[in-house]
Amino acid sequence: MGPLGGLEAFAGLALLFFLPGFTVARAVFPERRLRGPAGLRGAVELVVLSFVLSVGLTVLVGYLLLSASPGGFSASWGSPVLEATLAALVVVALAVGLVRGSYARVPPPSPVPEAPGEEGAFELTRELDRLRAEKVRLMARRRSVADRPQEAEALRREIARLAGEEESLARRREADFEL
């Protein structure tokens, strides 16, 4: 192995196991930074994501090259089609990341979270489940206090209130799915 052999091996390993995933991850998540209080965690997440994504992309590109070539392809130094394709992928992902601001000193703004009070479908379903469970619990309690009319009436009113709230949330959830 000559003096360039070690350098070639390092470049090949980086191209197969790190660079495609790193550039794609930076292009997809441009607002992520490796500095600040959560910098170490972000760096570990980025390294792991880069490795896993690179392995997946290498397998996918290899499969696509194998499927697209009528005689198949040889992933060897004599025919570096896989390496050239991965290098092109790295360049494209790097360009997309640069356009999106992944490598800028000031990060682009993070995606806007949902406004407070606007619940998604999961939160609405969870609230409906909570209301139904509370209603069932109160109905069982009302049966146990049937001999005390005042307490039974208070429970009946609370059950009616919960049923109305449940119906309102169910209508709201259904309205989200209408076109």
Image: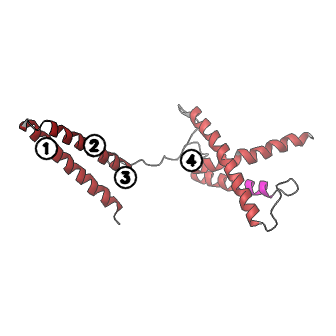
Query: Residue tagged by mark 1?
Result: 156
Q: Is residue 133 on the magenta stretch? A: no
Return the residue found at the far bottom: 70
Q: On the picture, is 23 further left or further right than 5?
A: left
User: Are the residues tagged 2 and 1 within 8 Å (C-beta)?
Assistant: no
Badge 1 marks a residue whose secondary structure is: helix
Which residue is nearer to you in this view: 31 or 178?
Answer: 178
Whichever of callouts 1 and 4 sits on the residue coming sooner in the sequence is: 4
* Type of the residue with mark 2: Ala
Quadrant of the rendered image containing residue 33:
top right
Name the residue type under label 4. Pro
Q: Residue pushed farthest right?
A: 2
Give the labeled residue for mark 3.
Answer: 121
Quickly name the residue at label 2. Answer: 133
So how many labels did they put on this image? 4
Q: Which residue type does callout 1 highlight?
A: Arg
In terms of sequence position, does the residue under pointer 2 or pointer 4 come before the other?
4
- CA gap, disc 1 to disc 3? 29 Å
Secondary structure beneath dot 3 equals helix
Location of residue 34 with respect to 97 vertically, above or below? above
Q: CA distance from mark 1 to mark 4?
A: 54 Å
- Residue 106: image x %, image y %? 55, 43
> Secondary structure beneath disc 4?
loop
- Closer to the chain start, of discs 3 and 2, is 3
| Separation (CA) of disc 3 from disc 2 | 18 Å
Disc 2 vs disc 4: which is toward the camera? 2
**Gap between marks 4 and 3, in whole Å?**
28 Å
Q: Residue at x 57, y 37 (%)?
A: 42
Residue ID for mark 4: 30
Q: Give the foreground label among 1 and 4.
A: 1
